Every structure is written in C-alpha cells, then in structure tokens.
Image (cartoon, rainbow, N blue to C red):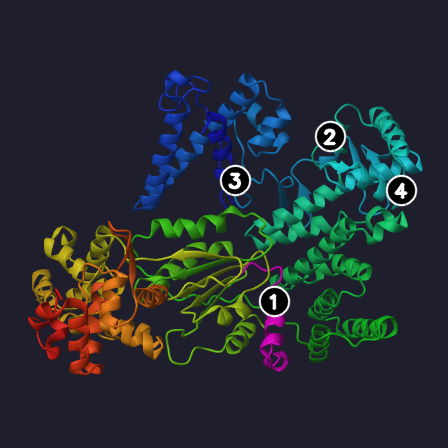
Amino acid sequence: MSRNGRLGGLFRFWNVPNVVFDWSDEGQSMADRVDEPVAGDPGAGGLDRYLKGLAEELAAARQAGDPASRARHLARLQRMSGWALRQAVTEYHGQGGTGRQDTARFVDVQFGTLYRRHQAGGRITGGDDAPPRENGPPHREIRDDRTVVPEEDDRRRTGVEFLILGEMVVRSRERMVPLPGPSVRALLGALLLASGDIAGEDRLLELAWGAEKGSRRALQCAVHRLRAWLREVAGPRYRLEHAGSGYRLTVPDGAVDITRFRDRMAAGAMTGDPERRMALLSAALKEWRGPVLGGRPEWLAADPAVRAVEQARVDCAGELADLAFRLGRPAEAIALVGEVAAAAPYDEPLQARLVRLLSACGRHAEALRHVERVRQRLADDLGVAPSREVRNAHTAALRGDDRPAASPRQLPSDVPDFTGRRREIAAISEPMLSGRDRGGPLVFAIDGPAGVGKTALAVHVAHRAAALFADGQLYAELRGSGSRPVDPADILGRFLRALGVDDAVIPCSLDDRAALYRSRTAGRRLLVLLDNAVDEAQVRPLVPAASGCAVLVTGRISLAGLTGARPVRLDVPGTDDAVRLLGRVCGRDGATGDPAVREIADLCGRLPLAVRIAGARLATRPELSPGQLAARLRDPDRRLDELAAGDLAIRPSLEAGYRDLPPAQRRVFRLLGLLPPAGFTPRAAAALLGVSPDGARTRLESLVDARLLDPLGEDETGQPRYRMPDLLRLYARERARAEEPGFTLDAALRRSLGEDQAGHLLPPDRLVGLENG
C-alpha cells in the first residue's frame, strides 16, 4: 500500500465515536520529539516507523494491567496522531500538489476543520463528551437552557446560504438575496436537491421543467444564467461545474439547509450520548420551514428524491419523540413533532407518538382531542379506522399513562476470567464502533460446538460495548439445545414489558408482537443478546429494525439463513489460551508453567467448558495436584466422569448435541466413535456404516454442520478427511456400548478394519476404552 493510502486509512481509523483525541503537542517542538518521525523525512524513520510505533502503543494500551499504564499509552497515542495530521497535509497538499479540498476529502476530515486545526498545530478535539465527527455537522454543545449552539456559525462563515426546506430562500449574512428568474430558480432548486452530487441533464430537465417539457437548449441557457448569477451574488467558491453528462453545484460546507439536516441526523445516529442525540435531532428539524421548495413546482411532490427527504423528516421526528419520552423531556419535543405531524397527517406512527408526548406532559384532554381528529380524518379521507398504534396511544391517554419507556439492563454478569478470543472480539466490536449508518441493525451470529464458549464470548463483548447502547440491553435464553425451545412470542412479550409496554396493550399473535417490538425499538440504540438459538425462524422476530441496534446471537449451528447476519465461527482455542484459562480458573501461582497443566488442557481437548471444569476441580480441591488430575484424565474410561464439578459437567453438554440429531444420524455418530482418533476418509466411514462413499460423505457433512465433526482438508490422494474431537469420540463410544447390540458393533468393525484386525480388538463391553481403534 502507498504511503498516502496508509495515511488515509489512519484517519478513518481515528474517526471512532465516543473517543476523543487531542492531536496537539502542547509546548513541544518537532526537534524535541526525537521518538517521532519528521513529516516528509523518510530517512528519519518516516511513516513506517510511525505506524509501527502506533501499533505498539495500541497493543500496550490494550494489554495494560492498571488504569495508570493504560492512560499513559493512550496519551501517547493522542500525541503521536498530531504528527499524522501534519504528515497527511504535507504529503497530499504540500508535496503532492493536490488541492486542499481533495486533500480533506481523501483523509476523511472536513475541509474547514482540517485546515483550521492544521494551522493551529494539529489539534482536533470535540470536548469531553463530543467526539470529532469530521464528516458530520459542526460540534454543538447543550447549554443549561437546552438550546443548541453552533461551535462556529455556519452561515457567517459561508457567506451565502441556500434554504430549500420550505420556500426557496437565499441569504447573505442574514440579508435576503433576490432570486433569479423562474427557470433559473427551478434549476438551482434541482441542483441543491442533489446535495453536491452530479445530476444528469435528463434528471435536471425532469425536476426543473417537468416530464417531457424542457429542452437541452433551455437547460443550457438556464445554466449560463445561473453561473452568471452565482458569480454576482456568491463569488468564486460557489461553482456550477459540468461533469460527464450532467452538472454539479459546489458550495462551501454548511451552506445548504438540506445538507445540514442530513449531517445532523447522521451525527445523531452515530453518537452514544442520548442528550447530544436529542440536541442534534432537534437542530435537524429546526432547519425545516415547510415542504421542500415550498411544494413548487407541483410535480416535485411526487418525485422519489423529494419524498425520501420528506420521509427522513418524519423519521427524524419519530426518533426525537421516542428519545424525549425516554429522557423524561416530552415538552421539549412537542412543538417540533407537532409541526411534522401536521405536515404528514396520515402517518399514524407519528400521530401516535404526538399523542403520547401530549399525555406525558399531562395534556390528556388535548391528546384525546388529537386522537379524535386523526380518527375523523382517516375515516373521511381514506375510509379506514385508526391503526393499533394510535388505539394504544388513545388507551394510554385515557388511563393517564405517562410513564417514559424503560431502559432495560438485562445482561448476565461478565465472565471475570475470560481469556483469548482477540480476533473474534475485534470482528464484533469494530463494526459497532465504526458508527456508520448501515440501514439496519448489526447482527452477529456466533456458532460453534458445545462447550466452546459461545455464551461467554457474547456476554463479554456485550459488556464491553454496552456504553454504545444507551437505551438499554435485552437478553434472552432461547433454549435451542433443549427439548422445548422458547417460543419467540413469549420472548417478545418479555422484551415489550421490559421496554415499558403495559400487559394490557401487548397483542396476542407473534406477528403483532413483532410489529409492536419494531415500533418500540425504532430510533433507539439497543443491544440484544439472544443465547442458544435453535434456528433462524426463532431469531427473526426478535431482531429490531432500527439501524442503531445490534444483535448478538449464539447457537450450535450456523444461522446462514438470517438475512444480514455476520457469521462468527468459534473453534477450540489454541493450547496457550487454554492453559491461561486453566491457570486463571484454578488460581494457583505458577500453574501456567506446570507441564501437567498443559497436559490437562490437551486431555480436555482445549474445550473451554472442559478446561473450566478442570480448573474448578483444582480450585476447590487444594490437595489435588495438577499431576494427579492429569493421571485421572488419561484414563479414557474415567475422563468424562472426572470432568464434573458442582453443577458443571461435560457430559450433559455433549448429550444435548447428540439428542438434537435425527435417529439415523445418532447411529452414524455412535459408530464413527469407533474409528481412529487421527481422522478418517468417507471411504473408511462407508465401510463402517455399510453405505456407499457418497452416502457416507453426505452423512459426514451433516455432522460437520451440527459441529460434531471437524473437517481436516484433503489427504495426499485428494480424499477429504474428518476427525471427531476427543471428548465427543469418548461420548460416542459410550453411546455405542449403551445402545448398539454387540453383534452390530462387531459387524461394523469387521467391515471397517477387516477380519484380522477386528478379531484382535477388545469385546464391545470395553469399546469405551479403545484409544487406537
């Protein structure tokens, strides 16, 4: 990767919500920073040395054992990043000759912010609770009077301001600017709707003149006049450029109200601070003065782009209403939500939210009158009755129910001795931290064999990420490995009650509960942990639709059919991680250096549940040495019995996966336990089972999907190989001895190994002790 490519990636790395970086080097000259590379001086160590140092500091911060050490490393990371800012500007603008706007665009930092802060010495901060949002609106602080105050006045800085969220208005330093003629004004409105993107000529003709009414000649004439008008009233920073087969209007940041509206909505979705989110959503709605471009010309109202902007306004009002209700500040949102509700009279979810806000402020009579107006309007204009959501809001107003929505905190306790899984933690945490608008919730499907630590990983990550989800965390055990998985309708009932919905208004059917759940979670930042799922059908109704939510699902099988889910596949950890886990659980000094501890981890198949049980036995039996426990575990006849401590035992966990198999596959699993531990091919399995190689392979792949077999790749002949993990193999032999007649086992062994080898094996009542056959 090029130096500039790495610098651009570095800036995107730092653009993380809820983290504030001070990129200054207070009172320190470049000559004093002997351990940092000098911008533009590859011979001094340059970018490679800087990136290496950054990675080392980041790793040290993650591994720091006490807050003071971590703080030192984080402070150094912040100090080092000031150099990165100077280096990016120097290489892209100073040395590469790239324009300032292109430099800012590449490194993903807002143009004005980048160069103001670069001139000030590389300092980019957002305050104690306001992270830098280089692609969003200017930072806004919430004062005691709850008004939203810009850090720097956009309008004063940009000079000329274009307002299209209402009648078109052009202002220059608070003075009205006369608008151009009708055709030029229509073209200007169409270009401003594109928000800096290229608008094709056909698209401009359709928006400005209507379908099949304009001409290329009329467009070119309007373009010429618009350019002249821009030069006269705005100056050189406002340019109408021809690009490809269309045109693009380039204006300074913050000069158009529709851009400010979108930026503030995006910033609100990214922040984890509900107070700040409410301020940003309120500021976004205050940009509106009426329909887009005043609703003229008349064909604009049906245009998809205009309808999308109008719908975004409704969505923003809905999010603000929900947030104000939860924060106990409904009065602050009523005016803004009421304006949008008046502009969208048939949007029943928004009307219901307005009713709830009025009721929450104690204005029950006004809330009831509004419900009646909504009911009458729907009946007269559309011939329909109010939706369930409006009826529920009506019921709440009648009862005087003004309780704010709850913020549940249902996560189980974190695992104090959690060990390893760095790669999986990063795969889940980094998308949560990115703050990007995904258009839907983040869903992570964690699958793996029994006892591999799926729940421990999900709970651990959920606690680490909980601060990003200020509206709460929901948890449910779905009992997918049990004989009676939980009905998702029952889980939805629990979730709705946790979110503040009264029992009396919770619907009965699964579909209605799911719809109400989606409504109650809309606009909220919730983390949902669904443990031990049986299949996709059980999970789908429990996934919120809001983009601010995240879902962690665990299950033994892959949930490949869950739309949009990111798979996280867990296998047994490496030996070092298993040994560290065993040492932490047993709590004995120097345990990780004891060879017997390493042997115990291997005899447990490095399976975290088995390792934890072994550690618990050592912790509760001080007289039991690691060597003594290892000796007990070496006996395959006793190993599963030894792996039990209190209510923790390995056998029930293995039994659950076995019980979930169809009867025919259970028999396949039992017989495969007779094959060698080093692995086998479908041909060997076919001989054992008495089926064709293709039939055997189908059965083996089914067990792979159930996480009861591990694929090992191909052997030297190109045949796939499989292996049954040691503890599962011992359990399979147990079941074979208990459930298969002796003559069946004898026949299977003779088919697999031949008469001579099978005749030398122990009789079936000792099969569980076979380690090599």
The 10 Å Cα crowd at callout 2, few under 14, some 14 to 19, many 20 or more, is few
Task: Indicate which disc, 4 or 1, sits on the residue closer to the N terminus.
Answer: 4
Q: Which residues are magenta?
A: 501-526
Query: Which residue is found at the position 63% from the left and 76% from the top?
Result: 512
Magenta span contains residue 57: no
* Relative to 118, residue 507 above or below: below
The residue wearing badge 2 is 243
Where in the figure is residue 648, as x and y percent of width and height? 25, 72
Q: Secondary structure at mark 3?
A: loop
Looking at the rendering, which quadrant does residue 136 occupy? Answer: top right
The 10 Å Cα crowd at callout 4, few under 14, some 14 to 19, many 20 or more, is some
Query: Which residue is found at the position 59% from the left and 64% from the top?
Result: 521
The residue wearing badge 1 is 518
Q: Secondary structure at mark 1?
A: helix
* Relative to 238, residue 570 above or below: below
The 10 Å Cα crowd at callout 1, few under 14, some 14 to 19, many 20 or more, is some
Looking at the rendering, which quadrant does residue 259 occupy? Answer: top right
- State the separation of the CA atoms marked 4 and 1: 41 Å
Q: Is residue 296 left or right of residue 100?
A: right
Where in the figure is residue 524, as x and y percent of width and height? 59, 60
Nearest to the eye among marks 4 and 1: give it.
4
The 10 Å Cα crowd at callout 3, few under 14, some 14 to 19, many 20 or more, is many
- State the separation of the CA atoms marked 2 and 1: 42 Å
Where in the figure is residue 699, as x and y percent of width and height? 33, 68
Q: In the image, which disc is placed on residue 15?
A: 3
Residue type at the position of mark 1: Arg
Task: Indicate which disc, 3 or 2, sits on the residue closer to the N terminus.
Answer: 3
The residue wearing badge 4 is 209
